[in-house]
Image: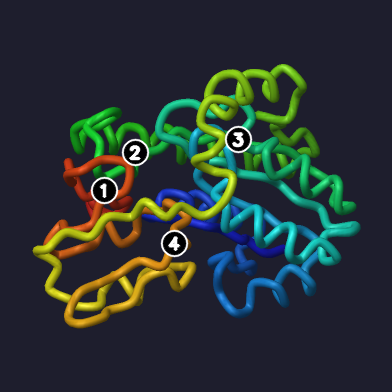
Amino acid sequence: MIGLYFSGTGNTKHCVELLVGLLDPSASAIPLESAEATEAVLENGTVVLGYPVQFSNLPYIVREFIEGNRSLWKGKKVFCVATMGAFSGDGAGCSARILKKHGAVILGGLHLKMPDSVCDSKLLKRSVEQNRALIEAADAKIRQAAAQIRNGTAPKEGLSPFSHLLGLFGQRLWFYKRTAGYASKLKIGDDCTGCGLCVTLCPTGNLAVQNGKAVGDGKCTMCYRCISRCPQKSITLLGDKVAEQCRYEKYAGQN
């Protein structure tokens, strides 16, 4: 077994690591964008795949990985985990449908409500205590799901035709252009100091420092890593001002 995750601010990383650890303490969980991800899928028969939903859809980097490695999935058993700030409908189903098309066997799906990670919007912002309660509830749900999977009755959230309709008409149709490819809307303010931290964090290689300032190259997958970590709060995407830098460890009480 291998855990494979795409995680912007740490929510999905935590969820996949916890679930995989409960199912197989000897198994590891690795980032989807890591150099060893393709080989890890090739060498393991069971994959726990996790990602955050964006407008009830897959982050484009996840879709690109699945489609770009389509030959890997034949016969693989995949359990899909979708994290979200509010609602997705068929978050797990978004990847499950593509994976099935490439020959994967879908074991089930799990939807987990976690702290919001959209740093440049006040929508869905909660207190630290409220976010900790969300994490505790998600952890309890993960433990329950692990027990169900071990008993052969894995949860199948987001996989039904009704869930598909909820995701499609709830958000995906109205915001499809936001997730149909990589975004080119990343904004970097004049107060950027060119420290380069964002360059090291970006999973798509979208950022570089030129003439003492960070610049984007139109390949943003909306993960919010750079926005949540920028020391100057200089970077925005959907909004124009950073409302709160959101990271899992902040709400989990680790930092």
As shown in the figure, which amino acid type bears the numbered disc 4? Gly
- Residue furthest to the bottom in view is 211
Q: Name the residue at 44% across, 58% down.
A: 220
Callout 1: helix, strand or loop? loop
Q: Which residue is mark 2?
A: 115
Q: Which mark is residue 246?
A: 1
**Residue 192, position as x, y percentages in the image:** 14, 67
Numbered disc 2: secondary structure? loop
Q: Which residue position holds label 3? A: 91
Residue 146 pos. (x, y %) = 63, 43
As drawn, is 234 to the left or to the right of 146?
Answer: left
| Marks 2 & 1, CB-CB < 8 Å contact | yes
Q: Which residue is mark 4?
A: 218
In primary-sequence order, the first of circles 3 and 4 is 3
Q: Earlier in the sequence, mark 1 or mark 3?
A: 3
- Residue 9 location (% of width, % of height): 36, 54
Contact, mark 3 vs mark 4 (Cβ under 8 Å)? no
Say what amino acid the circle numbered 2 marks. Answer: Pro
First in residue order: circle 2 vs circle 1? 2
Q: Residues within 10 Å of mark 2 (few under 14, many from 20)?
A: many
Task: Classify 146 as above or below 25.
Answer: above
Is tag 2's residue or tag 4's residue first in the polypeptide sequence?
A: 2
How many numbered discs sit on the rendered protein? 4
Q: Quadrant of the N terminus?
A: bottom right
